[in-house]
Image: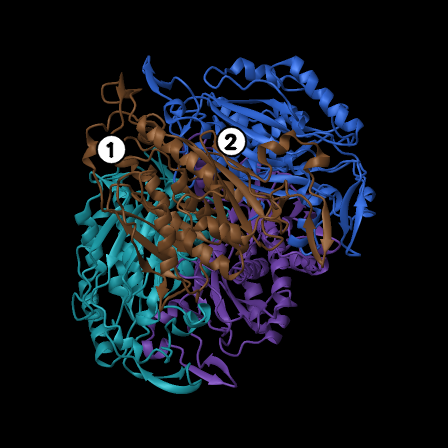
Chain colours: A blue, B brown, C cyan, D purple
Amino acid sequence: MSGVWGNNIKLSIFGESHGKGIGITIDGLKPGIEINLEDINKEMKRRAPGKNKLSTPRKEKDEFEILSGYFNNKTTGTPLCAFIKNSNQHSKDYEKTKNFMRPGHADYTGKIRYDGFNDYRGGGHFSGRLTAPLVFAGAVAKQILKKKGIIIGSHIKSIGNIEEGYFDEVNINQQILEELKNKEFAVMDDKKGLEMQKKILRAKENMDSVGGVIECAVLDLPQGIGSPFFYSIESVLSHLLFSVPAVKGVEFGAGFNIAQMKGSEANDEFYIENNNVKTYTNNNGGILGGITNGMPLIFRAAFKPTPSIGKSQRTINVETNENTTIEVEGRHDPCIVQRAVPVVEAVAAIGILECIES
Amino acid sequence: MSGVWGNNIKLSIFGESHGKGIGITIDGLKPGIEINLEDINKEMKRRAPGKNKLSTPRKEKDEFEILSGYFNNKTTGTPLCAFIKNSNQHSKDYEKTKNFMRPGHADYTGKIRYDGFNDYRGGGHFSGRLTAPLVFAGAVAKQILKKKGIIIGSHIKSIGNIEEGYFDEVNINQQILEELKNKEFAVMDDKKGLEMQKKILRAKENMDSVGGVIECAVLDLPQGIGSPFFYSIESVLSHLLFSVPAVKGVEFGAGFNIAQMKGSEANDEFYIENNNVKTYTNNNGGILGGITNGMPLIFRAAFKPTPSIGKSQRTINVETNENTTIEVEGRHDPCIVQRAVPVVEAVAAIGILECIES
Amino acid sequence: MSGVWGNNIKLSIFGESHGKGIGITIDGLKPGIEINLEDINKEMKRRAPGKNKLSTPRKEKDEFEILSGYFNNKTTGTPLCAFIKNSNQHSKDYEKTKNFMRPGHADYTGKIRYDGFNDYRGGGHFSGRLTAPLVFAGAVAKQILKKKGIIIGSHIKSIGNIEEGYFDEVNINQQILEELKNKEFAVMDDKKGLEMQKKILRAKENMDSVGGVIECAVLDLPQGIGSPFFYSIESVLSHLLFSVPAVKGVEFGAGFNIAQMKGSEANDEFYIENNNVKTYTNNNGGILGGITNGMPLIFRAAFKPTPSIGKSQRTINVETNENTTIEVEGRHDPCIVQRAVPVVEAVAAIGILECIES
Amino acid sequence: MSGVWGNNIKLSIFGESHGKGIGITIDGLKPGIEINLEDINKEMKRRAPGKNKLSTPRKEKDEFEILSGYFNNKTTGTPLCAFIKNSNQHSKDYEKTKNFMRPGHADYTGKIRYDGFNDYRGGGHFSGRLTAPLVFAGAVAKQILKKKGIIIGSHIKSIGNIEEGYFDEVNINQQILEELKNKEFAVMDDKKGLEMQKKILRAKENMDSVGGVIECAVLDLPQGIGSPFFYSIESVLSHLLFSVPAVKGVEFGAGFNIAQMKGSEANDEFYIENNNVKTYTNNNGGILGGITNGMPLIFRAAFKPTPSIGKSQRTINVETNENTTIEVEGRHDPCIVQRAVPVVEAVAAIGILECIES
């Protein structure tokens, strides 16, 4: 029940941060879909570490190898498995502190859950590194959706308390999303983006970390996607989003703000124009009753600050059962939000594909 | 894929607002569990409409009948099915406006999704009335959890822009939750509660509606519950929560606020006391790496204002394909937040039971 | 995991033989399908008890009530729930012998599995009566398949050691199946049928029972249905067939006989005729690699003799933990094969629909 | 829905016969289980080709590499993925005949199912080679079951029309199963075994092939395993068995023969001895109502003759749409029954583990 997800598009994820590698099997892809491996590579690189001083110096090329389900450059319709070897491991960094539970990490809960047998090195199966196979699967899903005219993109809405504007929930368009995709730091307002980056670097200097919010839009979705009662679009997407390490909040459309509106403000009034049914506003984020209405699907995910920080923190030693302190060494990101952008898009693509194929 | 949920505790929900009735089958309950029907009734009444002027005057007794899986006052271990007859239907209210798509409702998306064949009367399968079977299932789950010492409770955190304080995320206790359960309007601060109720009544007078936020706590959970990668506690709970009509945002622990913290603030430092491992703070809401750490599990769900309002709204007539206006008649709630409190607790109970039984 | 089945067409079954009733929820039906209730009734009657002296005198009208998912004579696309009330219960018959484990029945294993809390009256959830909801679901599935031109029919291949010929696996046609459907005792060779019925009546006189084999054919299936590796047509159908009480063997095409053939005999050679690809023989029963090839799909299911017999049998008393004897009283069938014919067709229809909708 | 199976123990299989390799991810294993890799290797070798003149000369070492979920010689509780590289491929053998549909194979149905995009080389995903990952998973399951005292073993019941006796369904014991496991040709009666082998070699000489039946026993199962209605032991095991290429029949206990018995013969009468409940006979194969009763679980699977034969067969050319003939070249087995013995045991082990963990 843990590593397998989905009904129509089934994912089966595996791997650990410092084991042989990580991978994913995607079951349920239609046969004959041409897959552009270079485009997958681009998505992998958007997430890959070691690109600049904003992220961890651990260099992983994240080169994937397709082990099955792909023949003559097309999907076969049978399970597509991709594997990413681990290369740049400093596993010893983790050996000496394995009994010191890093605050904010899954060290302690993982130990309890798996009776102490889980691979603790670098977070093991809990590592953010497991999002690389997700990005692979998402890149495949994105290509399939793109052939159907569906576009997914996102921006960094905030880093710490620095934030830029929301997407225009009615008029957000493909061009804006494409521009964001090509930016190393995905903001609409580059000035704000610089402030955000400064915020990250300052945290890094202070041996601290920061979090942030990513806003994502899915455009040109067909109307009528989503299956209440239990498989509302929101249920499917939030399920996947909350599987991504560090996500602590998910909201659709106006989200938590809609709770402060009146019905007369929140309701998106309908109109018809050239035989297309639209809404004047989009507080529901393109979803009504768990089903798409054809307006841009918009959601936000809140990421907590990277729990790995150099600052001294109080914690426990599970071997001695004593209170102690820890300074987390090893290589880590002062902020993972900018690297999480393609991850959010990936799970959006997977979730949407799942709903469309049903 | 739509009406069935779960791996260990499987729910199968059915019914429409103005059909014969609504119900749910719960599969996977252990045999021999004594179920207190009176306690289920109490939960049903917390949700039931028509209790006071804050809610719709539609009077539904929401009396359930157990059709199977229950023998000699105990669960049999085979599927438990409960049925709730619809009684107080004014179906004709909906007939005359069936082509007028109510803004904020699933009328339009449901019509598209089900090719126009769905039962449109009173929202049909999309009706908030479908949460009654959920409350039934949740009441059963709650009783099972209570036998394990696990307590679930919640309060209305806000109505519109009126809000009371958060739960104390470290010290929230059983007594507070029990007191809340016995209140007709579940707030900790009754003065704030009165303001909230005024807000609701004012909206009603204005033929408008308001939304709000519910905060829920689960106490005395064992450590080590939850199954990453894909079945984090957050994934399981959010999946269910976003199936509840009107929910547009879900957050755990500090939620969206954690994105503004530094790592050194957000990380919950561990300590050991009398052989119990605890954290000084609880920004992660009792969940690390998708697994419970034994601290109170805390989450919030944002509810949009009831879409049914008497005010005139712009919309479309799907028969004539023309723009038009609508004033939603029939009986509706100016706010569903106070009635949603037991629903939020119910899905929390179901989700937790699912995770514990795995 | 027990009462729920399927991925695309999800069944959720519930009920006990002597409780309030039995029922089923079918999830995943497309909206707008016209359902002929009279045709469902006919199928229900084919299975219903009390029709003649070959079956139990328990008279159950097996009248179903559709509780949801059906509006204006069509499916809505949301879960379709049907309920069948129990009426003619003699529950007391079972009370006095509840500690005597009936040989061949699930009394003992059910007691162990459910810690003694299962409803033991008349087999409870294990009763053959639970096949009535299956027949309902199958009747719906059959109607959907028929609109696609797919026909399902079957005959009693044998009762005890009396057997008639196999279906002609290449030339079996719709007319033969229709004729069988209209017979009270579904055999192709009526003379053999009379012998079979005599066999049943003789068993009845001797306070004994007999079993038999049902052969089923599905005609005009599209080619290419079935999803290896794990969802071969054989896997899906056998899964359902072995859920039917009393089935102990399932075989496709030549079945166990194919194990005695040479490859050159067993292989069904292909030919093309008027652009249709066919095979000269059909030892594979219309399935190659778990996928339909367009030839008639043919399978057989072996039913054991009804375990309820009047003859004295050795058994145990679970209260006293002593060896004892039992003569099973109450009303029971000397043979359930003839009543199982529509059940076999029903699960075939459900399984095929599941595979077609994927 | 195709490559993923299971609720508690989830399998995700991938790979093709002539691609990079084949593999499986096993999700849901408990943490901390010591796995003996040498024992897995032994199971792999029981299935591996190229051992003697009875099987295909294709030499595949079937060396597996564990990619995840295994740490310090124990399961971690997170997904266990194993990969087996393909090495000895003669893919060109298949290129020239790719338009000639081999009778009895999935060439034609696979082509239809996957719109011609499946990897046709050597049967691709349909190849019997895919049973190697199953044997890996089964070997892991066997080790886990063995720690619980549960033993699985089997024998070749027949090859063509040469057959040896059945297992003694009441007294079959661990010693017999162990002896069978160590035989290269798994029969109880070695004289009959020699006849069977001659039968295979004669078929080989004649460029033909033969099939056979495998009988499997599971000993010392706890009582009370299996979850009706839909997850009877028979349903779970048959589902997996019919996923194994070439299986066309499955029966439990007396199987098809039980249909010829009277109730008074078929019913297994109970008795109690030293507080153990047993049955005098075991016609139900250790299963009543889909649940184990503690007697030996016994089933048989019928395998068709290898479809690949050198003899000339009529078939079609899908490129030219013409009737033609084919002599299947390449390396193939004159009989796969002897190699299927560990496969049958593997799926039995997986199925039983799935049922026990529920």
Whether residue A107 can be seen here: yes
Give the residue type at disc 2.
Glu
Q: Using the rendered view, name the quadrant where residue D15 is placed.
A: top right
Which residue in the structure is indicated by mark 1? Answer: B330
Whether residue C167 can be seen here: no
Disc number for residue A251: 2
Q: Nearer the viewer, residue B238 or C62?
A: B238
Residue at left 41%, top 43%? B185
Give the residue type at disc 1.
Gly
- Tag 2 and tag 1, C-beta contact below 8 Å: no
The C terminus of chain C sits in image quarter: top left
Q: Position of residue A253 (x, y in %)?
A: 47, 26
The N terminus of chain C sits in image quarter: bottom left
Q: Secondary structure at mark 2?
A: strand
Q: Using the rendered view, name the quadrant where residue D249 is placed.
A: bottom left
Q: Position of residue D74 (x, y in %)?
A: 71, 56
Q: Nearer the viewer, residue A285 or D224?
A: A285
Residue at left 33%, top 46%? B48
Q: Position of residue D181 (x, y in %)?
A: 63, 67
Circle 2 packing at 10 Å, graded few (<14), some (14-19), many (20+), is: many
Q: Nearer the viewer, residue C31 or A262?
A: A262
Circle 1 packing at 10 Å, graded few (<14), some (14-19), many (20+), is: some
Count of labels shown?
A: 2
Along the horizontal axis of the image, is B197 left or right of C332? right
Front tag of 2 and 1: 1
Q: Secondary structure at mark 1?
A: loop
Along the horizontal axis of the image, is B107 left or right of D243? left
| Looking at the image, residue D233 lies above or below residue B282 | below
